[in-house]
């Protein structure tokens, strides 16, 4: 007589040694490897995107007649890429043969170093980026023609070495603000990009630390 | 995860986790990954267990949720699973159990949709329709109809 699925199920589990639980091992190694690999991929994509964006800005700036802006932004963005590429290369030096806890701890210190370097750089990068855009536009022929046309009309604009003083003060003020909040902008940007990964990483480190306690 | 917690609160229910994980994986490697992930999630969420249900029901619910989530993740990553209607021969753990009929039944179960797999696993574990309905999130009537349909489908596959 044909067996019912209920009896196959019950008898099958009675007869066999099917319910031997697998050993709990390598779980954290696999999880940490997965997270760090994901971070690596995202970091590389981010750098490639920065290079692509810098090329786009360069081409667009020539088309729009503001080449100085394009060149300076291109150089600045690529300096960031080169520094971060070197940082990424140093990440590969972490020994993958060590335990997951040691690997994660090494990765965490690399991460802290990377964030600290970029945060310090951001204090300069954002103001320089802003100045590059402003000066690039200022020295462009189109803007100079526009500015000459304004100055040709009767006006009360106070100039210092041919530059409107209030305009200059505005630029200095915004540059200072960028210098002050550059680090915070970077932290916000990093959390937006990698926040969920960092959270997972912290959870794993906390789990492993609890296990080691 | 402390070994005390694993030994006292998970290991006695390992059978439930094994049965569920086997139904959602096609290789020993995946099965072990799923099993470990379920154990980890049970350990992580032990503090939110409110004793409104039995510990075993909690384990069923968590195991199913973890397996379905992992399956979804793998699908999103472009990997194929039994729910993609792979023939039973395509799976590489068709001999996961010593009992041949049980292996055939598992291969048949793997050809069902993910939710149907959950329903039939709970049914085969003698869970009452009300409890299955609570775990799946539907009505007991719907579960009864589903079980009849699933059993017919399994019989056809096993013939």
Image (cartoon, coloured by chain):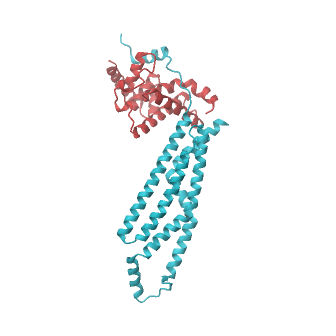
Colour of chain B, in one word, is red
Tell me residue B90's x, y (percent): 36, 26
Residue A91 sits above or below residue A152 on the image? above
Tell me residue A109's x, y (percent): 61, 48
Residue A76 sits above or below residue B53 on the image? below
The residue located at (40%, 88%) in the rendering is: A152
Name the residue at the right extreme. A213
Image-quadrant location for residue A56: bottom left
Q: Quick one: quadrant of the C terminus of chain A?
A: top right
The residue located at (43%, 76%) in the rendering is: A139
Name the residue at the bottom extreme. A154
Image-quadrant location for residue B4: top right
In this orientation, does residue B24 appear? yes
| Residue closest to the eye, A17 or A143 | A143
Q: Is residue A132 left or right of residue B45?
A: left
In this orientation, does residue A191 appear? no
Q: Quick one: quadrant of the N terminus of chain A?
A: top left
The residue located at (42%, 86%) in the rendering is: A151
Tell me residue B51's x, y (percent): 58, 32
Q: Is residue B8 left or right of residue A192?
A: right
Name the residue at the top extreme. A1
The residue located at (38%, 81%) in the rendering is: A145
Numbered disc total: 0
Tell me residue A133's x, y (percent): 46, 70
| Residue closest to the eye, B61 or B92 | B92
Residue A166 sits above or below residue A87 on the image? below
Colour of chain A, in one word, is cyan
């Amino acid at each position: 007589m044909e067996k019912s699925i209920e009896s196959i199920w019950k008898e099958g589990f009675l007869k066999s040694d099917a319910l031997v639980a697998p050993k709990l091992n390598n779980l954290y190694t696999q999880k940490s490897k997965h997270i760090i690999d994901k971070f690596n991929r995202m970091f590389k994509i981010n750098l490639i995107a920065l290079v692509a964006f810098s090329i786009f800005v360069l081409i667009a700036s020539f088309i729009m007649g503001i080449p100085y802006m394009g060149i300076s932004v291109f150089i600045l963005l690529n300096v960031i890429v080169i520094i971060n590429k070197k940082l990424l290369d140093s990440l590969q030096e972490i020994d993958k043969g060590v335990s997951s806890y040691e690997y994660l701890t090494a990765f965490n210190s690399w991460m802290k170093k990377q964030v600290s370097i970029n945060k310090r750089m951001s204090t300069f990068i954002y103001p320089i980026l802003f100045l590059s855009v402003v000066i690039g536009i200022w020295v462009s022929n189109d803007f100079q023609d526009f500015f000459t046309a304004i100055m040709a009309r009767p006006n009360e604009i106070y100039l210092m070495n041919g530059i409107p003083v209030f305009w200059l003060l505005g630029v200095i003020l915004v540059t200072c603000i960028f210098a002050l909040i550059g680090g915070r902008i970077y932290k916000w940007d990093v959390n937006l990009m990698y926040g969920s990964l960092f959270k997972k990483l912290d959870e794993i480190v906390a789990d492993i630390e609890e296990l080691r306690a | 995860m402390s070994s005390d917690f694993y030994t006292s609160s998970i290991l006695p229910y390992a059978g439930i986790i094994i049965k569920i994980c086997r139904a959602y994986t096609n290789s020993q490697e995946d099965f072990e990954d799923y099993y470990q992930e379920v154990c980890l999630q049970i350990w992580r969420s032990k503090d939110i267990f409110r004793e409104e249900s039995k510990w075993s029901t909690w384990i069923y619910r968590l195991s199913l949720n973890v397996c379905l989530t992992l399956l979804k993740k793998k699908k999103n990553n472009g990997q194929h699973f039994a729910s993609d209607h792979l023939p039973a021969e395509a799976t590489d753990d068709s001999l996961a159990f010593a009992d041949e009929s049980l292996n055939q039944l598992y291969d048949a179960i793997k050809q069902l949709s993910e939710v149907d797999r959950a329903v039939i696993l709970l049914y085969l574990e003698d869970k009452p329709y009300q409890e299955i309905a609570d775990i799946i999130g539907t009505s007991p009537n719907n579960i009864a109809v589903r079980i009849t349909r699933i059993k017919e489908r399994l019989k056809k596959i096993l013939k």
